[in-house]
Amino acid sequence: MRLLVVKLSSLGDVVHTFPALTDAAAALPGLDVDWAVEEAFAPVARLHPAVRRTISVPLRRLKKHPFAAWRSGEAAAVRRALGETRYDLVIDAQGLMKSALVAACANGPRHGFDRASAREPLATLLYAETHHVPETEHMATRIRKLFAAALGYRLDRRPADTGLSPATSARAPYLVFLHGTTWPTKTWTREGWRALASHAAAEGLRVLLFAHGAAETARARAIAEGLPAVELLPPQSLDTLAPLLQAAAGVVSVDTGLGHLAAAYGVPTLGLYGPTNPRLTGLFGARVRELPSTRACAPCEKARCRIAPDTRDGPPCLADLGAGAVWQALKALQAAPAVDKNRKSMAHEAGLPDR
């Protein structure tokens, strides 16, 4: 059976599709999977062992310079790549107009969320068949249910499996701190990161920092200044970042895409959440924990803090998280057994005991 998956972005959304692919590959031996994905995230989509081919969609360029893309033939090339294979099924796992339009270019019957489930209900007009998967559970669980309904198999209480695994050798003696994120309100304080790095150094662990762009680089340098155990790495591609995350002894992350990738590898991953709600789109994996803000105003889902709108070092809701408490939470997570977060979610929905 040939399947085309359409899940364009973002990095976390791509990773949240992995458990559904693992389910489908197990339920349908010989399944042949292609994946239409924004070109920046194609290296991540290729990490899943069930994926035969990725079709890179330069969506940002197509939206920003549509006439140039049309004249250059780039848009036509994407359309040819989508239409050249006859698929038994096309699943739009995103439920947006942009993903539905990409799916419409493919050669095969299209399935997706129904009007009550899709983020943009108009997208459902482009599907041959829709499925009701309400937005009451984590996105990874919803995509698992969408795939099961579209492909005709039962999940029952099958444990979630991202299809990825940690490094086979002993974990390397370093932690990764993922401090970079798109919203200023998702940022933890430099002082918090520095104090956390000092805890790591006291236990003989190095700390790796990544940075993308001038603002993140400035923050990373401020975190690393005067701390020999902290190493600021040069700019990395997703191809080289993935194995560094895979081998880490642990990851501490704000709400950012690379945190989801670390969680998918089964690396102990601790998420720091302030303005965003981890319940529906938080970390998903066997060894994850989230520390959400306890302030009444959180989660506000805002990129600008109304309490401290001019802060450049994160909002008060994240500043409340002390480095000592974060360190203890990471240590407890590293020592704890793996937990199937998806099984607990599905058992709760069905009124079954979590076990």
Image: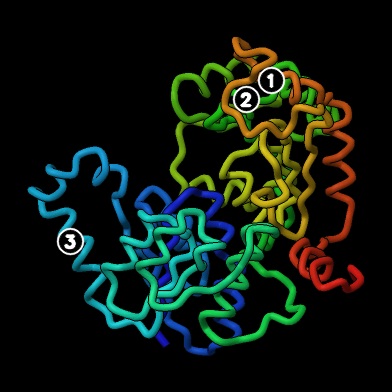
Marks 1/2: CA distance? 5 Å
**Position in image of residue 231 (x %, y %):** 61, 28
SS for callout 3: helix
Marks 1 and 2 close (CB-CB < 8 Å): yes
* Residue drawn at point x = 45 percent, y = 51 percent: 9
Indicate which disc, 1 or 2, sits on the residue closer to the N terminus. Answer: 2
Residue named by callout 1: 315
Amino acid type at circle 2 is Thr
Q: Which residue lies furthest to the top in this view?
A: 310
Is 59 displayed left or right of 119 in the figure? left
Query: Which mark is drawn over residue 185?
Result: 2
Residue at 48 percent of width and 88 percent of height: 30
Between circles 1 and 3, the one closer to the viewer is 1
Give the quarter of the image for residue 34: bottom left
Location of mark 3 (residue): 77
- Does residue 163 appear anywhere in the picture? no
